[in-house]
Image (spheres, helix red, strand yellow):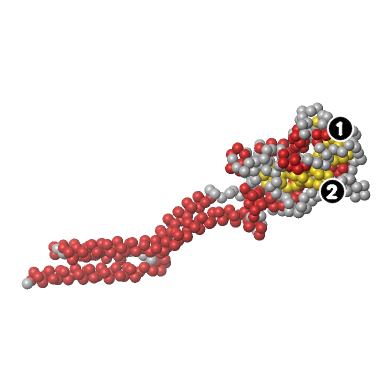
Amino acid sequence: MDRLHARLVAVRYMLATAWPIVLITAIGLLVAYQFVEPAPPRQMTITTGSETGAYYAYAKRYAALLAAKGITLEIRTSAGSHQNLDRLDKGEADIAFVQGGIRAPATPDDEDDDDSGPLRSLGSVAYEPVWVFYRGEQRVDKLHQLDGQRIAVGEDGSGIRGLALQLLEANEIRADSPNLLPLAGLTAAEALQKGEIDAAFIVAAQEAPVVQVMLRSPGLHVVSFSQADAYLRLFPFLSKVVLPRGVVSLVRHVPPRDAVLLATTANVIVRDDLHPALVSLLLQAMTEVNGKGGFFQRAGEFPAYKDQSFPLSSEAARYYKSGAPFLQRYLPFWLAVLVERLFVMVLPLFMLSLPLLKFAPAIYSWRVRSKIFRCYGDLKFLENELRGRYDPALAEEYGNRLDRIEQDASTLKIPLAFSDLLYTLREHINLVRAELLRLGTTHDRGQQQ
């Protein structure tokens, strides 16, 4: 029982020493928690285009990769880039495919500008060539040659229409001209083949069915932009690509010569409140799906920040500079996220606890010694009084005070490791008691003489 009692005394002192450290640590933990991102949701929504378009195909492949990481990607079709942006603005989607050039380029300071809106770019994932097909034998290499002709420029609200009107206006063809018709895709291709229109704008990948149909249709030609470099200066979101001669059909030698095309880009735009861990995961999926070489792109060319119509996400900037987060390279996604969140809390907690734990033994020792030092204080005051102004009439009071000090010392409950201090205190009490007896004896002898 005595051993158990002694251990309980030691535990009590330890707890008395530890509670301030625990309190300070808890406060630090609460403060650190304010800077920890919440766990990422397990579902995202992406808005694409039609089910026959490249955007939808990309999204399907993203969804498969994300599903392997435990994330569900809901795919919503749309009428085009403008509707996709509208859904992002309204919070109806987290991610959207947007055709390049439908908004003015972002300035370098836009990332810190509250007016830049809640949308951020994760980069471009592919070139989207601007195909301008026309009928007739006269070669067309400048858009102003189409002035006065019937031109399909895409449906109202579509990204194709917005881009086509920009290019035509640059060639002094008015956007409100009745000759600019709201036809798109296979509908435009069929009208062009039948001679119902004279030209059509198509923005799609080379392998798109509508492009393949029009490239192989007799009597249809594609505009090779002789002023391509000038367009790149006027419209920075555009790029120049080349369709090599004979690439459509080596036997029929289609096209008969290299065709210089303008190309916009397919861009992935997200809301700025999308969880950073999901942004990183999405960028990895974009790299897997769109990073390979293609008809107009080199391997590793995408994803990249080519169209600066939207400010680049800070997470995307870090990804392009350093790649995927370190932990996500070697750990399962959810484990990596958990470790990252804990690290944000544990690191400042460790930095705070280290000095506290360093001083804990000194604080523990001080708490134990302070009880003994209080007895030493009373003993020292009594000794000074005996040596400086001893009064024989107060001899009994001196003895009673000394007894109380000894009683207090005998009832002190301190850990066994500090028992030597208690025994030393008792020895010093006995020394003072001996001094009190000596003074009393000396006084008695003086009276007898």
Left-right relation of 438 to 332: left
> How many residues crowd mark 2 within 10 Å: few (<14), some (14–19), many (20+)?
some
Question: Which is more N-terminal, label 2 or label 1?
Answer: 1
Where does the N terminus fall, quadrant-wise? bottom left
Residue 166 point in image, percent of width and height: 74, 35
Q: Element type at marker 2?
A: loop
Under mark 1, the amino acid is Ile
Left-right relation of 242 to 417: right
Number of the label disc, if any, that sits on residue 233 = none
Residue 360 point in image, percent of width and height: 42, 61
Q: Residue at x 38, y 66 (%)?
A: 415
Q: Element type at marker 1?
A: loop
Q: Which residue is mark 2?
A: 244
Q: Residue at x 22, y 69 (%)?
A: 433
Residue 381 point in image, percent of width and height: 23, 62
Labelled pair 1, 2 in contact (Cβ < 8 Å):
no
Residue 40 point in image, percent of width and height: 63, 49
Q: Residue at x 34, y 64 (%)?
A: 369
Dividing the picture into quadrants, the one containing residue 24 is: bottom left
How many angstroms separate mark 1 from mark 2 (CA)? 27 Å
Number of the label disc, if any, that sits on residue 197 = 1
Where does the C terminus fall, quadrant-wise? bottom left
Front residue of this view, candidates 390 and 141: 141
Instruction: Single out the mark in the foreground, 1 or 2.
Output: 2
Front residue of this view, candidates 78 and 215: 215
Under mark 2, the amino acid is Pro
